[in-house]
Amino acid sequence: RWADMSGLNSGFFGLFLISVGAEIPDTIQSVTVAKKGYGSMAVANSIGSQIINICIGLGMPWAMHNAVGAPVMIDDHASLQIAVLFQAGVVTYSFILFLASALVLRLNKAVLNRRK
C-alpha cells in the first residue's frame, strides 16, 4: 500500500524497506560499542557487516542457483545499469569527500582510543 501511495515501483520499495531494516541493528550495535570506547570494533562492525551482507545476500543465491545447473537470468537491464551507475557515483563521491577532508585537515592517521 505504501508503494502505491508513493508512486514507486513495488520491487524497488521492497528492496528499500529490506535494506533499511537490515541496517538498523548494525547501526545500533556499532553506536553501542563506540559509546563503550571500542571505536575500532565499531568501524570493523560497520565494514564487516556490509561485506557479509553483500557476499551472503548476493553470492549464496547465485551459487545455489548455479549449483542446480540453471543459468541466472537478469531482466530489465536498463534499470540495473542505472542502479550500478548511481552506486558507482555514490562510492566515488564518498571517496573524494573523505580524501579531500583528510588532505585539507592534514590527517593521515585515525586515532581510536578507549574512553575512560
Image (cartoon, grey):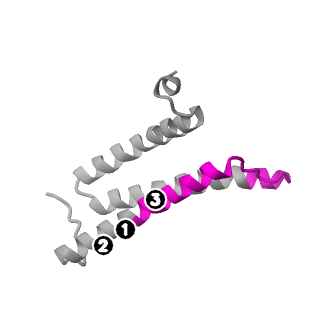
Q: Earlier in the sequence, mark 3 or mark 2?
A: 3
User: Helix or strand or loop: what does disc 3 sit on?
Assistant: helix
Instruction: Give neighbour class at mark 1: few <14, some 14-19, many 20+ (Cα, 10 Å).
Output: few
* Residue indicated by mark 2: 99
Q: Is residue 97 above or below residue 35?
A: below
Q: Provide residue 78's location: percent of width, then percent of height.
A: 63, 51
Q: Is residue 75 magenta?
A: yes
Q: Quadrant of residue 91?
A: bottom left
Give yes or no for contact between labels 2 and 1 (Cβ–Cβ under 8 Å).
yes
Q: Is residue 73 above or below residue 41?
A: above
Which amino acid does the dot numbered 2 rest on? Leu
Q: Nearer the viewer, residue 38 or 60?
A: 60
Question: Would you say 34 lies left or right of 51 here?
Answer: left
The residue mark sitting in front, 3 or 2, is 2
Question: How many numbered marks are there?
Answer: 3
Give yes or no for contact between labels 1 and 3 (Cβ–Cβ under 8 Å).
no
How far, Cα to Cα, is label 3 from label 2?
A: 21 Å
Q: Earlier in the sequence, mark 1 or mark 3?
A: 3
Which amino acid does the dot numbered 3 rest on? Gly
Q: Is residue 100 magenta?
A: no
**Residue range (magenta):** 63-92
On residue 48, the disc is 3
Question: Would you say 51 lies left or right of 73 here?
Answer: left
Which amino acid does the dot numbered 1 rest on? Phe
Q: Provide residue 76's location: percent of width, then percent of height.
A: 68, 47
Q: Residue at x 34, y 69 (%)?
A: 96
Q: Residue at x 42, y 59 (%)?
A: 90
* Residue indicated by mark 1: 95
Q: Residue at x 49, y 42 (%)?
A: 19
Q: Residue at x 29, y 48 (%)?
A: 31
Q: Is residue 63 above or below residue 96?
A: above
